[in-house]
Amino acid sequence: MDIRDQLKNLFPEHEEQDFQIPEEKFEQKEALICKFEKKGRNGKPVTLIEGFEGTDEDLKNLSKKIKTTLGIGGSEKDGIIIIQGDNRDKIMKILHNLGYKTKRVGG
């Protein structure tokens, strides 16, 4: 006798219903910061995207979307997306189309 049978014996008038947990849509509260950096990278320019509040899996998906859209390389680590080159304007446009707020930092 499993738990359902025991519950049916205790509550004969109860009808079992299916219940679905509502899926919560992730929403970024703070704006993502897009900044340009050359320091500490042998003079090679990169664009950093900081302030992402989602999971690591969401961060990887966002990074992949940016990289494939622009056709350039990059990586993600410690909650920061690193994209090769100075592409702040293009990245900010992509993020805006995806529904993220952005702030441009630096010249």
Image (cartoon, rainbow, N blue to C red):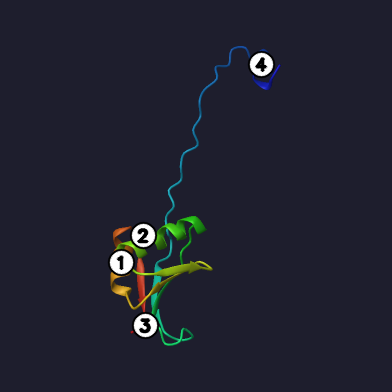
Q: Nearer the viewer, residue 7 or 44?
A: 44
Residue at 32% over, 58% down: 98
Can you give x and y, in whole percent of width and height, for residue 53 in the image?
48, 61
Tags 1 and 3 in contact by the CB under 8 Å rule? no
Residue count near mark 4 (Cα–Cα under 10 Å), binned few <14, some 14–19, many ≥20: few
Residue at 59% over, 12% down: 13
Report whether 15 appears left or right of 63.
right
The quarter in which the C terminus is drawn is: bottom left
Tags 1 and 4 in contact by the CB under 8 Å rule? no
According to the picture, the residue beneath numbered tag 4 turns out to be 5
Can you give x and y, in whole percent of width and height, for residue 66 in the image?
35, 63
Identify which amino acid the numbered label 4 is placed on.
Asp
Task: Give the numbered dot on residue 106.
Answer: 3
Identify which amino acid the numbered label 2 is placed on.
Lys
Q: Nearer the viewer, mark 1 or mark 3?
A: 1
Residue count near mark 3 (Cα–Cα under 10 Å), binned few <14, some 14–19, many ≥20: few
According to the picture, the residue beneath numbered tag 1 turns out to be 70
Instruction: Describe the element under mark 4 as helix, strand or loop.
Output: helix
Task: Give the numbered dot on residue 65.
Answer: 2
Q: Earlier in the sequence, mark 4 or mark 2?
A: 4
Instruction: Describe the element under mark 2 as helix, strand or loop.
Output: helix
Residue at 52% over, 22% down: 17
Q: Nearer the viewer, mark 3 or mark 2?
A: 2
Identify which amino acid the numbered label 3 is placed on.
Gly
Q: Is residue 102 visible?
A: yes
